[in-house]
Amino acid sequence: MIFNNGDTRPGAKYSSVEEIVLPDANGRYTLGADKKYGPDRSVWSYSAPNPTDFYSVNISGIQRLPNGNTLICAGAPGIVFEVTPQKKVVWQYNLPAFGSRGGANARQVFRAYRFGPDFPGLKGKSLVAGKSLEESVR
């Protein structure tokens, strides 16, 4: 899967997530009749219903989850959300602005991962809801 920042798209800038088929067993893409190497399109993609609502110029990423959903980290605006294979957003978190500098960079997040409750690093930890992130940093 690839996070396509979409910075050089013709027309409006918007991001998308693209799932492509990897090369053949020899690590090669096939040469198409148009003399371009494949793949010529993705097998699954996500962009917002209004494409320009989802745009991150840099520091973004994706993670395919065990349940088939996709975790998307739009790093520049500081938004993390999960979508189903049918492209329905099931939850979204907008990071709060941190620090005293404010401005556009105050929400940036480099990467996000989703860990299930069976993750070894959580063994023996209490997973009871507590203060929100915003309350914890005040």
Image: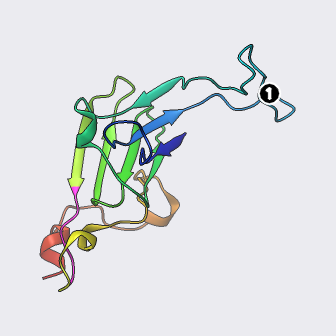
Tell me residue 29's x, y (percent).
Answer: 77, 29
Q: Which residues are magenta?
A: 94-99
Tell me residue 69's x, y (percent).
Answer: 40, 34
Q: Residue at x 42, y 39 (%)?
A: 9
Q: Which corner quadrant holds the N terminus?
A: top right
Choose between 30 and 27: the one closer to the eye.
30
Q: Residue at x 15, y 71 (%)?
A: 134
Let me know if residue 123 appears in the view: no
- In the displayed structure, does residue 37 sit left or right of residue 42? right
Choose between 57 and 118: the one closer to the eye.
57
The secondary structure type at the circle numbered 1 is loop
The image quadrant of residue 131 is bottom left
The image quadrant of residue 49 is top left
The residue at which mark 1 appears reads as 24
Going by the picture, which residue comes out furthest to the top?
A: 33
Is 95 part of what is drawn in magenta?
yes
Q: Residue at x 56, y 23 (%)?
A: 41
Let me know if residue 55 appears in the view: yes
Q: Residue at x 46, y 40 (%)?
A: 65
Tell me residue 116's x, y (percent).
Answer: 42, 50
Q: Which corner quadrant holds the C terminus?
A: bottom left
